[in-house]
Structure formats: structure tokens, C-alpha cells
Amino acid sequence: MKKSIIVSILLGILMVSSGALTKALTPNKKIADQQEKFDLEIMIPIEFGDWRIDRSIIPLQVDAETQAMLDKIYNQTLARTYVNSLGERVMLSVAYGGDQSDNLAVHKPEVCYYAQGFEIMKTFVDELLTQYGKLPIKRLLAIKGYRNEPITYWITVGNKAVLPGMEEKLQQLRYGLTGNVPDGMLVRVSSIDSDKDKAYQLQTIFIQDLLSSVNSSERIRLIGTFGA
């Protein structure tokens, strides 16, 4: 009888201490609360380089269920279509979330497009050379009927652009070990083109032009700090 009581007491102590340890190790300081506030609509210029907004084209819209989930993940979203003097169009989507913990990590385009009935093809990781360093990106091709949409995207966790998956998790962990919850951003660039290589080249030019048009603090928001 005494032995069972002692075991019960020890188990109780372990449960309490485990709960306290978990609470102590759970990040609770949001990086977003410590930074200067910003507005995506203002931060991303409506004209830059040879690009201007084409208000006649509406970017891909998600269904109500997916939108509700995105509203939980992101604090701000922006969707625009730009056109250049040659009539070439590029769609830009930017989403910012102040809480990039495991429960509220960015919603990847692969998932979003698949939910809209697209077939995801030819997915690969790459590096995009910018004037500020090499940006880790992911490319994919989304197909639905006659619509071929090559996509380039990247994500940031805190102050660093990372590839989705293991790098993303490790960056979250680095912040978590310091008691901080990182913010994050997903930037997606796409275009309607049956020639994916041509589309990716155009998207690269668009991204380089965009990064050149914003100031250093805004650029860090978009692509992080290289080498961080």
C-alpha cells in the first residue's frame, strides 16, 4: 500500500515538473511585437521599374474555407497583378504572419493551389541571384485545364529566408530556444505561360526590380538578412 502511494506521489511530481518545464521552454515573446509596424499595401510600390499594376486582372482567389484558415495564419495579405511595357504580366502575392510557431506556419502554395483543383508538377528548389545575395526559392508548375501557371516563391522565418521544410523548422527552433516566436512572410510570384522557362526568367527580372525599388528595411522584411 505504501509503495503504491509513493509511486503515485512520484508520478505526480514528474507530471508537475514536466508541465512546468514545458511551459518554461515554450516561446512566448513575439518578435512582431518588438518591431516597427508596417503596411504591405504601402510597402509594395504600385509602380517600379517597367512594372505597373494591371487592375483588369484579378489574381487567383481561394475558397471560403481556405480563406478562413489563411485569416488565422496571416495578419496581412496582398495580391496584385503587374504588367510591363511589353504587355507581360506577373502576379504577386505576399502574406505576413506575426506568429510562425508550428501551429501557425505559412500556408505553402503547393497546398493552396491543390485545394483549388490544380495539379502540382515539376517542383524543385533553386537559388535566385539578386543584387543583395542568393535568395533560396522554390519553383513549381500548377496546371488546371488549359491554365499553366509557373510559380516562384520563398518564405522568411524571422530575419532569414529559408527553404520550406527542414530549414524552416530549424529556424523556428533557433528562435524558440531563445524564448521568441518569429514572424514570417511568404512571397509568391507567378504568371500564366505554357513556357515555364520563359516564365521563370520573367519572374526573376520582376523580383530583382521589386527588391531594387524598396528601401533596406523593407527589403529585409521581404527577403531577410543574408548570412543571418
Image (spheres, rainbow, N blue to C red):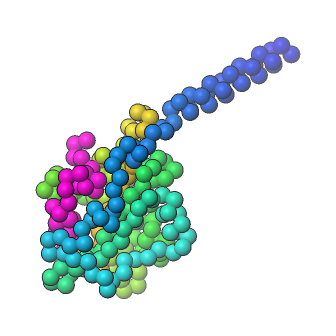
Q: Decide: is 220 above or below 118.
A: above
Q: Main secondary structure of the magenta part?
A: helix
Front residue of this view, candidates 165 and 93: 93
User: Where is the C terminus found, in terms of image quarters?
Assistant: top left
The answer, for residue 201, to whether it is visible in the render is no
Residue at 48 percent of width and 48 percent of height: 102
The answer, for residue 24, to whether it is visible in the render is yes
Name the image quarter holding residue 186: bottom left
Residue at 42 percent of width and 38 percent of height: 180
108 lies left or right of 36: right
Question: Residue 157, percent across and down?
Answer: 36, 49
Residue lying farthest to the right in this orientation: 1
212 lies left or right of 120: left
Question: Residue 132, percent across and down?
Answer: 15, 53
Residue at 81 percent of width and 18 percent of height: 5
Question: Residue 148, percent across and down?
Answer: 33, 79
Question: Residue 83, percent across and down?
Answer: 22, 79
Front residue of this view, candidates 38 and 18: 38
Within the magenta stretch, is there residue 103?
no
Q: How many marks?
A: 0
Within the magenta stretch, is there residue 202?
yes
User: Where is the N terminus found, in terms of image quarters?
Assistant: top right
Query: Which region is colored magenta?
Result: 200-228
Front residue of this view, candidates 107 and 182: 182
Residue at 19 percent of width and 56 percent of height: 215
